């Protein structure tokens, strides 16, 4: 009898360990898929979900905060994605956050990325619809060049010349003596100004478009009912403004230097010691380069977005 | 001595000569092999009957039909008035409490101790006993076969003769009215066989049982048989006492006694 | 000649099917043999654990070591826990458990019931007021049906631990990271079908072992044959059931 009791005891332990393991495993997996714990639902609409499926992860700022519950086609151009998000991520996600479809690694699963936008907005609530970001198509961006791009190339070459000269010890004196350098800088500044003006001009145009769209004016306005496009235009406008702002700052910096050089104030020693200046100069060149590329890409992308194609065509016709 | 006790039993039961087992026109075949052909036979209360036959002549089949392990193709087998082939499991179990069966190969459960082996039929037949009563019955049964000290041994530790005794104890623990012995002395040496035969007689006297004994061991037959049934060609070929049959002139019968 | 082989095969299949059908009839009728069921669970489940555990551990370790070179070729070494966990949980652990049990338990049941049959113990039980099918077959089949899934779960856990050690032989992957990756990869679609099929494996192993033992031919040679064919048929059935289970889960899109 005692032997049987100890047998039953061992059998009991065996069975309990086995079932506990199974239940724990199921629970862990369930909690990874947010089946337990409190969650809320939000959705976003995309043109194209690139094979996103039920069960794919949703990431906010790169952290898994939920899963995709369902992917449904609503119309010929939009797909609704419903996502389950953990409650404890709610406070960080704002209403104006942008959802985009991405990939985990090079060959990994599809996932939804939610990224916050630098603007004040209330916290997201249950059943909110997030704005979605159209995935940028690389080939469109790479394909063409633009006037602005050309301009910036000229500027950056000029500035690079200057910085190279400043950086090389031997030619430091040359820099101080050479008025051509000063002239170069001057031209650069002028070019930058020109570029940023151009940027502003485009910005203005875009603002006009978006305003028109918002008011529902004109043919484009009538055509564009999709909020996604208007939001992407908005973003572009914001970016453009930022670029032109930074261009203005750089321009200011450079003109400051030029002024110093022209006034003949300060000696080579001061210039030498002022490494900060050189650093700034370098940074300026780089950020202009970068800015120019993004601006160019954005503009290009905009041009190819279908409702704006017409607009730009009209513009070029007008110029002619 | 033995003769005397046999006579005593016969005398004791003279008044109650009603048959406890009635076998009528039983047929059984396995494939093309017709084992029992129109076999008929009655066992009366208090009788020890030996069924004598060649190996493979269907003796074991016959008693397995009686206990309900094998269904006959045709015919009736009435035990205490109930036709075995018609019974369902519950009814059969009730009959089986009253009919003990000693298997040729003892059929002791290898995985159980002697005690558990003896407990098994008690518990299985849902006989209400307390632990003490149960223990008492086991000890009694073991004492009857003279092996009270083997209670906690495993069957594999026992000799052939001891196994047979334990199997007998297990059969007797339910105090059956009829015991069916399937070749009780086969595989045992002559001395042990004789001991077992004597034990069978003793117990039959003690518990006033009837018995059908399947055997071809003449030493055993001589000791236990009050009546002998010759099973030849699937039929109840002849009946009679040991001496009657031994002196028979029929060559088929004589064949067994040579 | 050919037709007799075919006939034999079909007859046996029919007999096994009828034998299994009887299980469902008898299993739900009263007089439940709980004590015997627990005893069988102990012998079939608990006593098989060491063997299953060692095999599962080695399989986990070996699969991990063997998978590494291929993944390294793709520069996807970090995927090792993911890949190994899926193959272990979905296929290797349950099937290895079932095969080990088919060998150990199937032959054990075949031989035990076979020798009980030969020495008339099954008849003796019948005579002692016990339905031998219930007492011997139902308890054993139930025990295998419920114990093999538990063994498979334990085998999953142990083989994943083996995988953890395997990952750390040549690479570095912390305990937490390993399990995080494993559970990130695994879904219900991996675990539930793989455990569900082990119930089928268990049932098949039990029923074949019992069938072979219960209808063992007379003689000690018959016992050996019962044990042997129990192992052969139940191993084969494990693979066939595995194939069916995988196809069904695939068709139902449960994967």
Image (cartoon, rainbow, N blue to C red):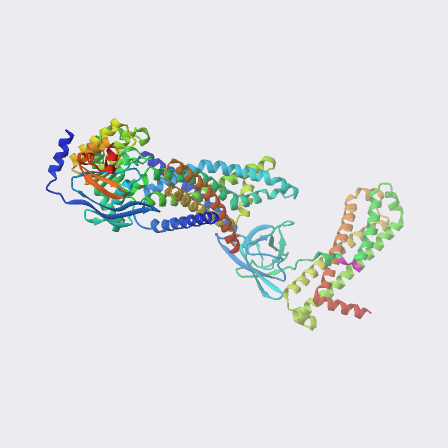
Residue A146 is left or right of residue B99, and the answer is right
- Residue C198: image location, x then y, percent: 46, 46
Q: Is residue B240 visible?
A: yes
Decide whether residue A147 is among the magenta residues.
Answer: yes
- Residue A93: image location, x then y, percent: 57, 55
Q: Nearer the viewer, residue C25 or B205?
A: B205
Determine the residue located farthest toward the bottom in the rendered image: A218
Residue A62 is left or right of residue A295, and the answer is left
- Residue A217: image location, x then y, percent: 68, 72
Determine the residue located farthest toward the top in the rendered image: B191
Residue A239 is left or right of residue A34, and the answer is right
Looking at the image, residue A73 lies above or below residue A278: below
Looking at the image, residue C245 lies above or below residue C110: below
- Residue A279: image location, x then y, percent: 77, 46
Give the magenta range: A143-148
Decide whether residue B141 is among the magenta residues.
Answer: no
Residue A84 is left or right of residue B214, and the answer is right
Q: Nearer the viewer, residue A158 or A258?
A: A158
Q: Quarter-wise, where is residue C126 in the image?
A: top left
Q: Is residue A27 visible?
A: no
């Amino acid at each position: 009898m005692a032997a049987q009791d100890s047998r039953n005891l061992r059998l009991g332990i065996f069975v309990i360990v086995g079932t506990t393991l199974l239940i724990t495993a199921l629970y862990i997996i369930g909690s990874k898929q947010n089946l337990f714990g409190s969650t809320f639902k939000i959705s976003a609409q995309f043109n194209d979900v690139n094979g996103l499926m039920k069960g794919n992860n949703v990431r906010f700022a790169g952290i898994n905060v939920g899963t995709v519950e369902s992917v449904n086609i609503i119309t010929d151009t939009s797909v609704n994605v419903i996502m389950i998000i953990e409650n404890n991520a709610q406070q960080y996600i704002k209403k104006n956050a942008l959802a985009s479809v991405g990939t985990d690694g090079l060959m990994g699963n599809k996932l939804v990325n939610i990224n916050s936008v630098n603007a004040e907005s209330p916290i997201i609530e249950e059943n909110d619809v997030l704005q979605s970001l159209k995935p940028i198509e690389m080939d469109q961006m790479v394909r063409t060049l633009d006037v602005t791009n050309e301009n910036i190339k000229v500027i950056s070459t000029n500035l690079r010349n200057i910085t190279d000269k400043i950086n090389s010890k031997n030619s430091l004196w040359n820099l101080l003596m050479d008025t051509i350098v000063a002239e170069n800088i001057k031209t650069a500044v002028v070019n930058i100004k020109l570029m940023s003006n151009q940027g502003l001009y485009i910005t203005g145009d875009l603002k006009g478009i978006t305003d028109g769209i918002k008011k529902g004016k004109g043919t484009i306005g009538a055509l564009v009912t999709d909020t996604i496009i208007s939001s992407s235009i908005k973003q572009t406008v914001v970016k453009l403004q930022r670029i032109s702002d930074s261009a203005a700052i750089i321009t200011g910096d450079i003109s400051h230097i030029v002024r110093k050089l022209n006034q003949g104030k300060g000696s080579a020693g001061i210039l030498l010691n002022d490494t900060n200046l050189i650093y700034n100069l370098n940074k300026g060149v780089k950020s202009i380069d970068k800015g120019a590329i993004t601006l160019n890409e954005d503009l290009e992308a905009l041009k190819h977005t279908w409702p704006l194609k017409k607009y730009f065509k009209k513009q070029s016709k007008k110029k002619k | 001595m033995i003769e005397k006790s046999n006579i005593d039993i016969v005398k004791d039961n003279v008044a109650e000569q009603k048959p406890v087992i009635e076998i009528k026109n039983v047929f059984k075949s396995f494939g093309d092999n017709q084992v029992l052909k129109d076999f008929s036979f009655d066992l009366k209360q208090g009788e020890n009957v030996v069924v004598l036959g060649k190996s493979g002549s269907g003796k074991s089949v016959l008693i397995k039909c009686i206990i309900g392990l094998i269904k006959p193709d045709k015919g009736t087998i009435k035990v205490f008035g109930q036709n075995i082939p018609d019974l369902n499991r519950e009814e059969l179990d009730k009959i089986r409490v009253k009919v003990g069966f000693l298997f040729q190969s003892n059929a002791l459960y290898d995985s159980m101790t002697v005690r558990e082996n003896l407990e098994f039929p008690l518990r299985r037949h849902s006989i209400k006993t307390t632990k003490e009563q149960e223990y008492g019955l086991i000890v009694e049964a073991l004492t009857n076969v003279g092996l009270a000290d083997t209670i906690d041994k495993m069957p594999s530790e026992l000799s052939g003769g001891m196994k047979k005794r334990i199997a007998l104890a297990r059969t007797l623990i339910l105090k059956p009215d009829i015991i069916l012995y399937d070749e009780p002395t086969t595989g045992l040496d002559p001395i042990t066989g004789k001991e077992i035969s004597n034990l069978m007689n003793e117990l039959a006297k003690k518990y006033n049982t009837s018995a059908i004994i399947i055997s071809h061991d003449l030493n055993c037959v001589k000791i236990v048989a009050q009546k002998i049934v010759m099973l030849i060609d699937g039929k109840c070929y002849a009946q009679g006492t040991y001496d009657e049959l031994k002196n028979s002139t029929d060559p088929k019968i004589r064949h067994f006694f040579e | 000649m050919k037709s007799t082989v075919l006939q034999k095969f079909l007859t046996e299949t029919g007999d096994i099917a009828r034998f299994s059908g009887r299980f469902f009839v008898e299993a739900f009728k009263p007089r439940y043999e709980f004590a015997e069921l627990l005893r069988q669970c102990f012998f079939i489940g608990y006593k098989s654990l060491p063997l299953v555990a060692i095999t599962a551990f080695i399989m986990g370790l070996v699969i991990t070591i063997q998978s590494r070179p291929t993944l390294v070729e793709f520069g996807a070494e970090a995927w090792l826990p993911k890949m190994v966990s899926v193959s272990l949980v979905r296929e290797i652990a349950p099937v290895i458990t079932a095969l080990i049990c088919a060998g150990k338990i199937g032959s054990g049941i075949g031989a035990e019931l076979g020798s009980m049959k030969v020495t008339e113990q099954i008849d003796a039980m019948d005579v002692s007021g016990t339905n031998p099918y219930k007492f011997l077959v139902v308890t054993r089949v139930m025990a295998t049906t419920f114990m093999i899934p538990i063994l498979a779960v334990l085998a999953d856990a142990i083989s994943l631990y083996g995988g953890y050690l395997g990952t750390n032989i040549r690479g570095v992957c912390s305990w937490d990271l390993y399990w995080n990756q494993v559970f990130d990869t695994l879904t219900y679609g991996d675990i539930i079908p793989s455990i569900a099929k082990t119930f089928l494996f268990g049932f098949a192993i039990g029923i074949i072992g019992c069938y072979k033992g219960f209808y063992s031919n007379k003689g000690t040679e018959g016992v050996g044959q019962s044990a042997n064919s129990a192992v052969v048929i139940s191993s084969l059935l494990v693979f066939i059931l595995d194939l069916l289970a995988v196809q069904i889960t695939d068709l139902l899109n449960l994967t």
